[in-house]
Image (spheres, rainbow, N blue to C red):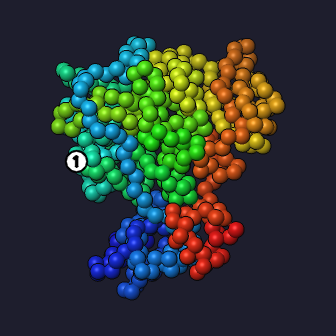
């Protein structure tokens, strides 16, 4: 079905709409049904967009008929779920120009030493998609590293970062942290000054964007060859509501694209707070907390042993701003692109590295700090790059949180096969010769692998019993289960009151069954 047909169903009358929803269809028959429903002149449901890659139709629903319309959609064969087209926002703080050009973070993570060890500062063969408020691609410190991008907020090919009261240049700042060239007098340098930056805009000048456009940006990045996606934004919503976003990240995972997400700036524990995309839990993903100049956690940074993987400098970070400017911003938004730049530098040394392997290297080489993450560590660029170049043996995953009775696959990066695995506390978890770890009882254990030459490597903590926020039974941050937005009692619409009304109309819907 052509997108033009669906867009032709837009209504220009004066009816009051309750809001936008995304409808996931599973087959052509369901898409045809949606088209028929939304092209009727008296329909309460009007289609406004169609994402064929994600199999999503964006619809507006008349407010007075919201519950009945949603019930009708949810009861149609071939409709998998309906979720609100919720807003996502950038994780940032206001500009602070008190310490221009002071890049303490670059020194803190030993970037200069990492570049010396590598003999390079990255590679333009590595593409990092900065999905954000856009990027000032004309900025002298960024222009040599830019490629063509797209603006999904305004649906055109110009992803220029448009500033406003709530957006000082968030995306441009993030891009500079990844890959400012360091070749401009009085400018700044990114963690991977030799890189290719793909600017993708879905957040507007207010630092806000919707779920539909975020998904489009992720799919575009994957299609156009990005190896890394840097995502310094999110929303606190239930996992079922975030299903389309999780599916987009899974598509990236399936293509080997590494997804790096900000933990958020609420000062909360993500293990008990649902935050997406931060809590997505896929193997290709790295979620980042912020650290300060003294390696302490800023009060505003989110954290979490099960759901946040590393910390990175994110307080008073100097980087590029639109119109050839520079300035300080703070937030997990700033911590995230520094990690994205580091991952780009690592991929320049070894393009075969997977997200799970990169995460394990970052965690086992990071500097130990008192910031609650899976590794209790802050990234160290030199140690990470050295581990890549020297082919240091690493346990993958290096850290995990699982439920009792669950299993995860453990492997060794580098080393000589065959490998032998051992658990430090078999009463908490056991591990077979093939690397299958089985969680037995609540507690913590570590895994040691020995290769054929007698070399050993040890993991960090494998925690058993502490489940992460929004993670359904049977899953863990390394291997989440297939998404099922229809779990009994789990309202995918984000509003329990609406779900209660719908369940009175259609009590046989999956989330209505107790």
Asked whether residue 276 is in view, the answer is yes
Asked whether residue 115 is in view, the answer is no
Where is the C terminus found, in terms of image quarters? Answer: bottom right
Residue 270 at x, y = what percent? 54, 42
Find disc 1 in the rendering and name its residue.
164
| Residue at 57% over, 18% down | 391
| Residue at 57% over, 64% down | 491
| Residue at 54% over, 55% down | 238
Q: On screen, 79 above or below 329?
A: below
Residue 369 at x, y = what percent? 52, 22
Q: Quadrant of residue 62?
A: bottom left
Q: On screen, 124 above or below 505?
A: above
Q: Nearer the viewer, residue 375 or 255?
A: 375
Q: Secondary structure at mark 1?
A: loop
Residue 77 at x, y = what percent? 59, 75
Q: Nearer the viewer, residue 1 or 46?
A: 46
> Residue reaching furthest front?
299
Left or right placement of residue 7 versus residue 413 in this view: left
Q: On screen, 172 above or below 194?
A: below
| Residue at 46% over, 29% down | 297
Mark 1 neighbour class, 10 Å CA radius: few under 14, some 14 to 19, many 20 or more:
few
> Residue reaching furthest bottom?
42
Residue 305 at x, y = what percent? 59, 35
């Amino acid at each position: 079905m052509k997108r033009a047909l669906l867009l032709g169903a837009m209504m220009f009358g004066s009816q009051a709409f309750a809001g936008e929803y995304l409808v996931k269809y599973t087959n052509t028959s369901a898409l045809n049904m949606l088209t028929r429903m939304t092209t009727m002149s008296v329909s309460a449901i009007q289609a406004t967009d169609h994402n064929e890659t994600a199999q999503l139709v964006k619809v507006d629903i008349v407010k007075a008929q919201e519950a009945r319309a949603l019930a009708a959609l949810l009861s149609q064969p071939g409709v998998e779920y309906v979720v609100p087209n919720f807003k996502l926002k950038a994780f940032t703080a206001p500009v602070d120009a008190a310490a221009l050009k002071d890049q303490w973070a670059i020194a803190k993570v030993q970037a200069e030493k990492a570049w010396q060890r590598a003999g390079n500062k990255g590679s333009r063969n590595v593409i990092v998609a900065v999905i954000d408020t856009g990027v000032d691609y004309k900025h002298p410190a960024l222009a040599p590293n830019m490629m063509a991008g797209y603006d999904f907020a305004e649906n055109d090919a110009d992803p220029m970062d448009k500033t406003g009261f709530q957006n000082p240049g968030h995306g441009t700042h993030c891009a500079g942290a990844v890959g400012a060239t360091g070749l401009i007098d009085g400018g700044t340098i990114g963690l991977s000054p030799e890189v290719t930056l793909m600017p993708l805009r879905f957040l507007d000048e207010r630092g806000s964007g919707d779920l539909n456009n975020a998904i489009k940006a992720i799919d575009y990045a994957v299609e156009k060859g990005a190896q890394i996606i840097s995502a310094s934004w999110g929303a606190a919503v239930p996992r079922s509501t975030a299903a389309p976003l999780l599916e987009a990240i899974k598509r990236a995972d399936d293509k080997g694209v590494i997804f790096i997400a900000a933990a958020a700036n609420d000062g909360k524990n993500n293990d008990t707070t649902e935050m997406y995309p931060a809590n997505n839990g896929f193997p290709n993903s790295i979620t980042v907390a912020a650290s300060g100049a003294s390696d302490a956690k800023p009060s505003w940074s989110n954290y979490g042993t099960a759901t946040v993987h590393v910390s990175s400098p994110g307080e008073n970070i100097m980087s590029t701003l639109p119109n050839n400017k520079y300035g300080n911003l703070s937030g997990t938004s700033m911590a995230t692109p520094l990690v994205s730049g580091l991952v780009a530098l690592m991929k320049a040394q070894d393009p075969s590295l997977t997200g799970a392997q990169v995460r394990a290297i970052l965690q086992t080489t990071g500097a130990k700090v008192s910031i609650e993450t899976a590794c209790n560590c802050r990234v160290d660029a030199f140690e990470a790059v050295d581990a890549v170049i020297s082919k240091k043996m690493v346990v993958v995953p290096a850290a995990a949180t699982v439920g009792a009775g669950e299993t995860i696959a453990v492997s060794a990066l580098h080393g000589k096969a065959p490998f032998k695995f051992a658990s430090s506390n078999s009463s908490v978890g056991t591990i077979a010769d093939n690397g299958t770890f089985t969680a037995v009882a609540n507690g913590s254990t570590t895994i040691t692998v020995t290769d054929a030459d007698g070399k050993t490597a040890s993991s960090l903590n494998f925690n058993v019993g502490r489940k992460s926020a929004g993670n359904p039974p049977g899953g863990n941050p390394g291997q989440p289960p297939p998404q099922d937005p229809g779990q009994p009692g789990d309202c995918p619409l984000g509003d329990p009151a609406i779900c209660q009304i719908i369940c009175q109309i259609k009590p046989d819907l999956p989330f209505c069954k107790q």
